Amino acid sequence: MDRPLQGNGSSQRCCSYRTLKSWLPILSWLPEYKLKYLQMDLLAGLTVGLTTVPQALAYAEVAGLPVQYGLYSAFMGGFIYTLLGTSKDVTLGPTAIMSLLCFSVVGEEPQRAVLLSLLCGVIQATMALLRLGFLLDFISYPVIKGFTCAAAVTIGFGQVKNILGIQDVPHQFFLEVYYTFHKIPEARVGDVVLGLVCLALLITLMLMKSHPGSENRSVGSRFARKLVWTVATMRNALVVVAATIVAYSWEAYGHHVFTLTGHTAQGLPAFSPPPTSDTTSNGTIVSFKEIVEDFGGGLAVIPLMGLLESIAIAKAFASQNNYRIDANQELLAIGVTNIMGSFVSAYPVTGSFGRTAVNSQTGVCTPAGGVITSVIVLLSLAFLMPAFYYIPKASLAAVIICAVAPMVDYRVVIEMWRIHRLDLLPFLATFLLSFWQVQYGIIGGVAVSGALLLYTMARPKIKVSDHGVLVMELGNGLSFPAVEHLNHIIHSQALQTIPARSVVLDCHHVSIIDYTVISELRDLMRHFKLKKVKLMFSGLQPSILKVLLKADLEGFSYADSLEEALLMDRWSGGDCWSSWCGWSRRACHCGWHQSWLWCSDGRWTWLALFCCLLASYYPLKAKLFDCSPAVMN
């Protein structure tokens, strides 16, 4: 008696620990952690950290927030993802797209950006717990590409004013374009020169990294390639540091040549709950409800885009490096990161493709590399904030432009034109509307994609061929939007012709059917009976056949294949169709065709024909062969 109880307890403990590991993936890899993993994680974390700091400062500019908020948003993800993440490569933090979305929703109000992070995290974590990740499947690839291309153009052009050193340019895209060109005469020479030099250096280092030269196995050649790769990988940090040194030198001699970042809050952020209300400049208190109403559609768009971006990155690198991720666990990791980030004044974050690529290329072994990156960000906040005063805005603008430029992918337009031109509609809708408001672009693109999807459901392809009877092959599922289309084709090509013609519906592609379709089929079969012709089904999948049999349609006849249906049509005659064919179908489903009713060459034997004709007039056929409709169900 004791052993089963002990075994049961052991099983419960095992299941409990397995469940705990599914919620805390760190328990899967930490017990097997090795010293060589630590070495690679340290190297990768250090490299990504040196990339993260300048990018975080720059992306805060895109979000319309003080630069320190970029660093506030860059360190929580490393700690949380180490505990909850399932990809060794992904790094969470501020990105260009999330920064743009944040700016479009909260403007230049840091308190609201922090509250937005909390709300986005709650939504994302709830989606993970409810297993709602499938909602991301409704955002099609053309919509994603249209949005990223438009976001890259918007972000990139938005930094031109910082390259030129001009002030007071509106943030709305079309006004921004107009005023940027209108104020070119006000450009500052120092900012223009520094910005262009930074751009040239970043592009040169980027090209050096992507074209390492010929493979030479000599020690000197390998060392040179490694050095070039290291310098190119840390190009953002090196360029920003060099620009800061130049700016500090000019400022030390009293020459205000460059537009600088200016004063920033020093030290680590306080750990406190995000504000749930706001106060305007004139002292009016804005309640939590009013703030949420102001967020509007951004509360739907930002969480979904954050999840979509991060999971797409995780899947790409999991496939590249031969491991699997848990999509719902990834949702939970992002959601908890945004929730906890809001307690340290972070705005919404997601996975960064660029930093994840650096992480993977540097040879990271576990998510622990993110902890090293987070420590570097915290050290920067603790000790380097005074130096950030001298960072020229032109250098940060150059970093942003080089980061978003690869997102403008013109080749995808050519591919869509060549492969499936209809996909250009959601792409263009998303791309163009995003210049008005980025969230409108995503909503518009999803709406167009949904309309195309619904049109495909409502107008399925129906191939009509003549085999003595009309054969109509349904191209996909048969659901209620398609009923009217099917009804029109059947009436126009079979029932309204003189004489009316029998029809075989080839349903081998049909995997769904609903009550509306059943009702319409019942009506169609009544019309066929009045016209003294037949409607027969072939190739029904078991689930569809079960539904149709339960519907108890009068005169319902079916065959396993189109060839069988056509053969039965050639042997049938007038009103005996339903009787002998109906019985023969039941007999076949009871296994008779495996013995003597059906020959191996696909022809009915004379004996089978005789038996079918005899059985059609035999009143006890269902009992004798045990093939009544009740048995079939």
Image (spheres, helix red, strand yellow):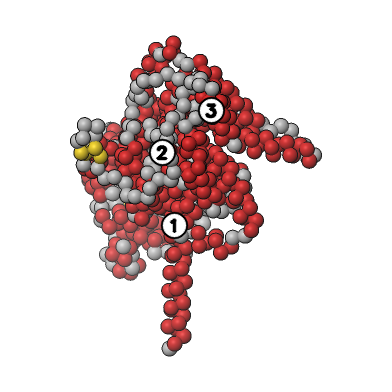
Q: Residue 238: x, y in percent?
A: 59, 33
Quarter holding the N terminus is: bottom left
Q: Residue 629: x, y in percent?
A: 29, 62
In space, the residues marked 1 and 3 are separated at their CA atoms by 102 Å
Q: Residue at x 61, y 47 (%)?
A: 43
Q: Is residue 307 above or below residue 499?
A: below
Residue reaching furthest to the front: 253
Q: Earlier in the sequence, mark 1 or mark 2?
A: 2
Q: Is residue 302 above or below residue 151?
A: below
Q: Earlier in the sequence, mark 3 or mark 2?
A: 3
Q: Which residue is mark 2?
A: 265
Q: Earlier in the sequence, mark 1 or mark 3?
A: 3
Q: Residue 482: x, y in percent?
A: 30, 39
Q: Which residue is mark 3?
A: 248
Label 1 sits on a secondary structure element that is helix
Q: Residue at x 38, y 15 (%)?
A: 178
Mark 2 Cα within 10 Å, few/some/many (few <14, many 20+)?
few
Tell me the kind of residue under disc 2: Ala
Q: Which residue is mark 1?
A: 606
